[in-house]
Image (spheres, rainbow, N blue to C red):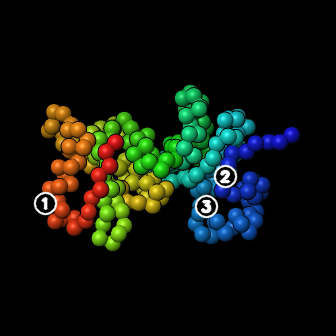
Amino acid sequence: MVVCRMEIPVCAFDLKTGIFCERCEEKIRRGEVSELDIRVMRSLLELEKTFHQLQSMCYVKSVDTKDAIAVVLRNGNLGAVSQQSLALLRRKLSDSLGKNVRLVEDSSDIGRFLEPLVAPARIVAINKIWLPDNSMEIRIILDEDRGLKLSVESIQEIVRVTKNVNLKVDFARRSRKRVLPVKEKVVKEVEAPEDRDKRGSKNHVVSL
């Protein structure tokens, strides 16, 4: 009988025994797989016995922040699972790891990746800012900071580790009675001469 396993970046047998082959050891040495990844993957494989949906999922990365452990899975993995099952999985995984867990789907679209991390706040604009050293910084503007489930620092850490970019988070002014449309609001900020002088960089605007 063939047993399906969650797709993981190391050998399932090595993960279970704790004795890693040369290929897996190399991934650990290079930092592609961390001690946290190993702990999380072991817990996930154990939970497969109860949550059979995990067998069709693909593990990407975990990030330990001050608020929670973010467990990133392949894009599309969570959509086919009911909210009730996801809530139970999060609770079981949190109990196993001894810390609150957030399940996140990976995505090449940074806005889509960030949406569940900043909920219930809403992203009203995203800027990709190219710095003089040719590195890139992502800046997002949220409609409000009330009710954020994760701190700004935790969100920034998740993005830094998984996407290898720096994230800056700002909030729409509380004094405004309405939030300007995304394109209008961002263009005004980007084209302000004083902002260009301060940054000394070129801004590329992406509207959601």
Describe residue 41's horizontal placement relative to residue 199 as left or right: right
Going by the numbered disc 2, the residue's amino acid type is Ile
Q: Is residue 168 visible?
A: no
Q: Residue at x 18, y 65 (%)?
A: 198
Image quadrant in which you'd find residue 77: top right
Front position in the image: 194 or 31: 194
In the image, which disc is placed on residue 193?
1
Q: Which residue is mark 3?
A: 33
**Residue 66 percent coordinates (x, y):** 44, 52
**What number of labels is visible?**
3
Q: Which residue is mark 2?
A: 8
SS for dot 2:
loop
Between discs 3 and 1, the one toward the N terminus: 3
**Residue 32 percent coordinates (x, y):** 59, 63
Q: Are there few (<14), some (14-19), or many (20+) residues within 10 Å of tag 2? A: some
The quadrant of the rendering that contains the N terminus is top right
SS for dot 1:
helix
